[in-house]
């Protein structure tokens, strides 16, 4: 019963991750359009577009930050335990190592989440604007990317723990 609940939660979190990842893939199209507009305006007409730098930076940041959970989901992140996996440990031992890894990920993400949310709320409350450009865009949408990324990492950490627990409690240990 508990294993089936954990498997349901894992599937739900994995589905959320896939939806976000597919959405991020679409961010490349407005990014391409904005960069082309900026290059054409700057080099052909010698008139830079004041908002293009900020918007293109933000659109670059979206997939960079939010895809972290996707890489955890696909097990494509760089991790120290990869060296241990090369020693041909049993799936159960690998899952135990994954539990430690995901508990560390969860503790760091949860620890940083509250200050990130607080910074985003302050940015909204004070209508924080960029002082780097004449355009002076509001910064809270950029600040919101950090807590969203942390929430995605937390969901993926819970999913990873779920995968590990299912492996630990449902697989046989062949390397006794």
Image (cartoon, rainbow, N blue to C red):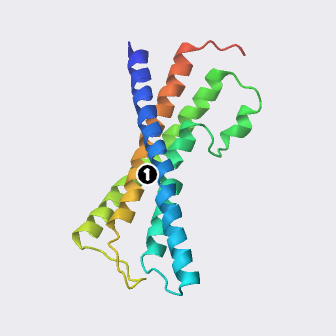
Q: Residue 127's image quarter? A: bottom left
Residue sitting farthest toward the front: 44
Q: Which is more toward the observer, 129 or 163?
A: 129
How packed is label 1: few (under 14 Cα within 10 Å), some, or many (20 or more)? many
The x, y position of residue 25, in whole percent, is 51, 48
Up the image or down, 167 lies above or below 105; here it is above
Q: Residue at x 42, y 50 (%)?
A: 150
Q: Which is more toward the observer, 22 or 76?
A: 22
Residue sitting farthest toward the left: 125
The x, y position of residue 41, in whole percent, is 51, 80
Q: Which is more toward the observer, 173 or 146?
A: 146
Q: Which residue is mark 1?
A: 149
Q: Quadrant of the C terminus?
A: top right
Q: Residue 145's image quarter? A: bottom left
The x, y position of residue 66, in whole percent, is 47, 51
Q: Is residue 160 left or right of residue 94?
A: left
The x, y position of residue 10, in whole percent, is 44, 28
Up the image or down, 88 lies above or below 121; here it is above
Q: Residue at x 43, y 81 (%)?
A: 50
Count how many numbered circles sit on residues in the image. Answer: 1
Q: Secondary structure at mark 1?
A: helix
Q: Residue at x 50, y 56 (%)?
A: 29
Q: Residue at x 62, y 21 (%)?
A: 92
Q: Quadrant of the N terminus?
A: top left
Up the image or down, 175 lies above or below 76; here it is above
Q: Is residue 152 left or right of residue 45?
A: left
């Amino acid at each position: 019963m508990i294993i089936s609940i954990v498997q349901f939660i894992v599937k739900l979190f994995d589905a959320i991750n896939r939806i976000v990842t597919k959405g991020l893939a679409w961010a490349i199209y407005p990014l391409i359009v904005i960069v082309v507009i900026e290059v054409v305006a700057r080099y052909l007409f010698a008139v830079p577009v004041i908002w293009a730098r900020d918007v293109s930076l933000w659109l670059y940041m979206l997939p960079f930050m939010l895809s972290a959970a996707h890489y955890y989901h696909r097990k494509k992140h760089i991790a120290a335990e990869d060296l241990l996996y090369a020693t041909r440990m049993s799936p159960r031992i690998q899952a135990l190592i994954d539990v430690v890894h995901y508990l560390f990920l969860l503790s760091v993400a949860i620890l940083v989440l509250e200050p990130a949310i607080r910074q985003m709320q302050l940015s909204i409350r004070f209508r924080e604007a960029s002082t780097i450009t004449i355009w002076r865009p509001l910064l809270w949408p950029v600040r919101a990317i950090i807590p969203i990324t942390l929430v995605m990492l937390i969901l993926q950490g819970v999913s990873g723990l779920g995968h590990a627990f299912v492996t630990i409690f449902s697989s046989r240990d062949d390397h006794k």
